[in-house]
């Protein structure tokens, strides 16, 4: 089974590359951002709380995210070829939980980290914001999301480096070139 943790700052291309990887390798794609936005769209009480956090560019609490991931992994079909975890984990605590959960089900994962210059991230998200309708795609919130990424998410690179499954990718290039780098990592995995 091939499990991939796709990590990177807001706008680094996690969602875009997940689509390519899922199609090429027949993997499931779990975007925690999409799961949370689906809850907001339901208009539930939980969705309102999530909306307040996401709109400000803040992370949803770890314990809430843990439930999402635990349910997802527990319900994976036997014939699943693997999952792309897009946007999870985002804290060291989430990374530790995911390692434990995967271990419990006899699985492991490689972490692919999309590294993109800050100016490019802002440019991409401002551009997307013209069409996306996402409450967090405006300059102030984008800046805050990037700061949250530096403070809370970036440290997970050290966690995976320490665990020996860290694979950095230069995400500044065109979509196809970034995908080529990812393909090389996947196809060398386990050799
Ligand atoms: P989420 O939806 O995951 O948002 P994000 O991490 O901010 O990432 P984005 O979707 O903005 O960007 P992306 O990296 O997927 O890039 P994309 O491919 O779209 O999470 C939203 C919120 O939910 C979080 O802020 C948090 O509040 C909450 N949340 C989610 N997971 C959580 C967790 N685990 N714990 C706690 N809270 C959580 O590309 C962006 C744009 O750039 C697109 O227009 C695309 O076409 C373009 N583009 C992509 N690649 C390239 C390229 N190589 N060249 C040119 N343009 C490109």
Image (cartoon, rainbow, N blue to C red):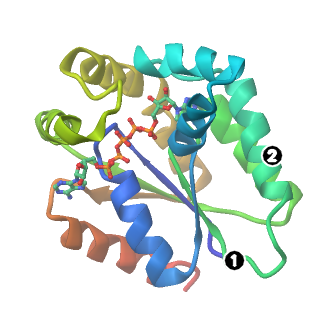
Residue 175 spot, x, y in % from top left: 21, 65
Q: Secondary structure at mark 1?
A: loop
Up the image or down, 85 lies above or below 159; here it is: below
Q: Quadrant of residue 61?
A: top right
Residue 63 vertical placement versus 81 (above, below):
above
Q: Residue at x 23, y 23 (%)?
A: 138
Which label number is shown at residue 70?
2
x, y percent for residue 33: 51, 40
Left/right of residue 11 with respect to residue 30 in the rendered view: left
User: Which residue lies at the image location 22% right of the left edge and 41% below the top edge?
Assistant: 131
Query: Which image quadrant is residue 109 in?
Result: bottom right
Q: Classify mark 2: residues with Cα within 10 Å, few (<14), some (14-19) or many (20+).
A: some
**Sequence-wise first label, 2 or 1:** 1
Quadrant of the frame with the C terminus: bottom right
- Pick the front one: 120 or 22: 22
How many numbered discs? 2
Residue 42's image quarter? Answer: top right
163 lies left or right of 80: left
Write the residue at 73% across / 45% down: 69
Q: Is residue 45 left or right of residue 34?
A: right
Please provide percent x and percent y for residue 112.
44, 58
Q: Front-most of 190 and 22?
A: 22
The circle on residue 1 is 1
Q: Out of 101 and 65, give the one closest to the viewer.
A: 65
Question: Which labelled disc corresponds to residue 24?
Answer: none
Residue 23, how many percent across, how many down? 46, 78
Q: Residue at x 84, y 77 (%)?
A: 78
């Amino acid at each position: 089974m091939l499990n991939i943790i796709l990590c990177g700052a807001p706008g680094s291309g996690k969602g875009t590359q997940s689509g390519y990887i899922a199609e090429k390798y027949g993997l499931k794609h779990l975007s925690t951002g999409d799961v949370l936005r689906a809850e907001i769209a339901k208009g539930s009480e939980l969705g309102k709380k999530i909306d307040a956090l996401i709109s400000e560019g803040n992370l949803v609490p770890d314990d809430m995210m843990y439930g999402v991931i635990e349910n997802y992994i527990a319900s994976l079909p036997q014939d699943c070829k693997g999952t792309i975890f897009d946007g999870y984990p985002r804290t060291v605590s989430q990374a530790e939980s995911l390692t434990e959960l995967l271990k419990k089900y006899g699985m492991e994962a490689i972490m692919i980290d999309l590294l993109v210059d800050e100016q490019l991230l802002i440019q991409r998200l401002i551009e997307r914001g013209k069409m996306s309708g996402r409450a967090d795609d405006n300059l102030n919130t984008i800046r805050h999301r990037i700061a949250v990424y530096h403070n809370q998410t970036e440290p997970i690179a050290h966690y995976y480096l320490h665990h020996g499954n860290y694979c950095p990718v230069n995400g500044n290039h065109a979509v196809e070139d970034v995908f080529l780098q990812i393909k090389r990592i996947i196809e060398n995995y386990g050799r």
